[in-house]
Amino acid sequence: MKKPFLIIFLLTPFISIGQIRPEIDLQKFIENLFQFPEEDIVYDDLYESLYQIYINPINLNNTNYSELTSLYMLTPIQINNLISFIEKNHPLLSIYELQTVDGFSEQDIRNILPFIEVRSPGDYQTKGNLMKRISIEENKYFIFRSETVFEQQQGFEKTDSTGFLGYRNKLYGRFRASHSKDFSFGFTFENDPGEQIAWNAHQRQYGMDYYSAHLLLEEKERFKKILIGDYQMQFGQGLVVGSGFNPGKGAETITTIQRSNSGIRPYTSVLESGFFRGTAFTYQLHPNWSISPFYTRLRQDASLKMAKGIGNHSKYISSIQNTGFHRTLNEIKNKKQIIEQTYGLNITYQNTKNRNFEAGLTFLKNRYSLNLIKTPNNYNQHEFQGNQNYNIGVFTNYNFQNFLFFGEWAISRSSGSAYLIGLLSSLTNNLSFSLSARKYDPNYHSFYGNSFGEGSRTINEQGFYWGIKYRPSKKLWFSAYYDKFKFPWNKHQVEAPSDGNEYLLRFNYSPSKKAKTYLQFREERKEKTIGSSSNLKTLAEGIKRNYLGNIELKTSDLFSLKSRVQYSTYTINNKTSQGAVMTQDINLSFKRIKMSARFAIFDTEDYENRQYVYEKDVLYAFSIPAYSGQGTRNYLLVQYQMNRKLTAWCKLGRYNYENQNIIGSGNNKILDNKKTELKIQLRFKM
């Protein structure tokens, strides 16, 4: 088949703009894919993992099925059509040749544009000294951010050992220099509110409380990747090691249930746990075979206790701390108390002829410097105890016509096992479905596992998932999923084996490029322990229903609006509570200034009905606040590009609560009915 030169010529004005990858609104992208937040946890790591794909875009002239699935945006039939097209017309001259690929709409191309590129092999050839290449690289920047809460928090008023010792501001900095398929070098530092800035070798603190750094080299002859410093890994379906972006269940009901075999990547988040610190590399043994050994040695925060008994003076770990906070004397006491060593390797086979089959084996071993011994209770009897663990897992991905089959099976030192199998399929360009089954034993222990499921960990769960997406026209599409799950052993606040189910329905309608709306309904049934008047405890089914309506209007390139309504109910033991939030967003864009504002009003009766809503934030920050109680939430975000190199952001937000004069609890308690936050950030492109 000949190159479609005529089409490229006709699209030249469109191509000339599109070939320059835009700065993507990652928050908006994740909002369409993301799992529904149910806990007050930090989601920055997910944002950072997706950002790694953005700064290292996929070269369509040198890609495979697994790499394309990592975008979570392409159906099996789209990927098949794309790979077939590339094989017939290799190499591509322009991204916009995708318009001639069957099944790709203009919107599909715009969606994946920030994550892909078209390059010839010669574009990656690099010469000269590494430090010189870093110094002259155009893709190089430094960011500095400061955050503060205006109202006084209780922790800053205390003078005893339970009070905060440091400053009120949160400080964050990042430097990054990278060149696709050549190198990436960067460092990050952070100081949380209440943490000291100090130079104390005894406490292993040298200025800021947290530092992270990495150096990645790519495509150095047979070494595909060499990484020194902090990193994360993703092999198979995440049963053994699954660090990184894991959308889970959400509005995208097809592609997000399967994880890609993305391998080794730099770690740039400020979360102080769940990553590796050491060295790793990927070596091409053969065109079809690669091996990725890794080693890490990382100090972890932990609470230590002394073993009881006559003549027994040994220490043990009672719990590992993952918050990363070192604000009080007790938190500092737990800082970096143990050493975790992890080593292992991955071996992957990939069919390079037609790129439709991939299989691999992963081995990982962990060793703590002390034994972990948890205080026994009703739900942790199968949890890990000791100082050593290992995992072995095998995985495979196979693409047959418009079907993608995937799966992984793993075992841990305890003999507990886990598996996940599934398939994605496109019956037509307009109809896709997905199926998945999982089983994670209560005694399967994986410290770095991060697979698909209802729970936040790969343990004590069984489930079956079914998803569907139907697009009858370019303007209208419908998606749905159903997930049935079971927990064979007790869980926190669930003092017996339990089960549940969840389903979602979503309708999307875009009458034009400037307007879109969607309606969504989700219901989840899950059992929970409740107490009776006789102090007897029993399981009761809790039913949570969520209703969501969203409208977006873009009247011009300068002005856009977004209106959103969320409502939920929670019923348990014949009692029903409810919660709601309404938000109105306004966005303005001028030549050098961009402004975003929100007004939100919320009313929730209890913790079960707290409402999570995404909101815009400064670059590389990710915000999903929880609205709980009664009140309003407003913010104003301003971005000002001073010149080609320097850009500034300022975000001012405030909660105003009704019928309460206390916000938060513990050291974070504020004796007021309002909470005001200020965030300032500068980015300097070098």
Image: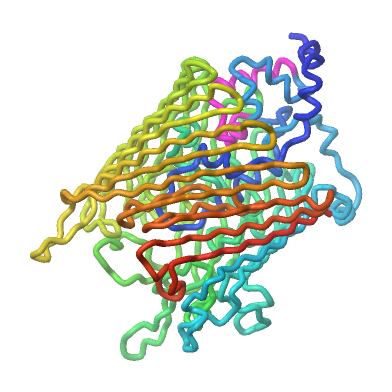
The secondary structure that dominates the magenta segment is helix
Q: Is residue 461 above or below residue 15?
A: below
Residue most extreme to the top: 1
For the point 79% across and 31% down, the residue is: 119
Q: Is residue 127 visible?
A: yes
For the point 21% across and 47% down, the residue is: 541
Q: Is residue 476 above or below residue 627?
A: above
Q: Is residue 242 left or right of residue 26?
A: left
Q: Nearer the viewer, residue 175 or 380?
A: 175
Question: Is 217 included in the stretch rendered in magenta?
Answer: no
Quarter of the image where one finds residue 249: top left
Q: Where is residue 564 shown, x and y percent of the image?
A: 46, 40
For the point 43% across and 81% down, the residue is: 315
Q: Nearer the viewer, residue 205 or 391?
A: 205
Q: Is residue 140 left or right of residue 535?
A: right
Question: Is 69 included in the stretch rendered in magenta?
Answer: yes
Q: Is residue 187 visible?
A: no
Q: Nearer the viewer, residue 394 or 66?
A: 66
Q: Where is residue 576 shown, x and y percent of the image?
A: 22, 49
Span highlighted in magenta in the image? 64-89
Q: Where is residue 288 shown, x and y percent of the image?
A: 65, 33
For the point 38% across and 61% down, the residue is: 658
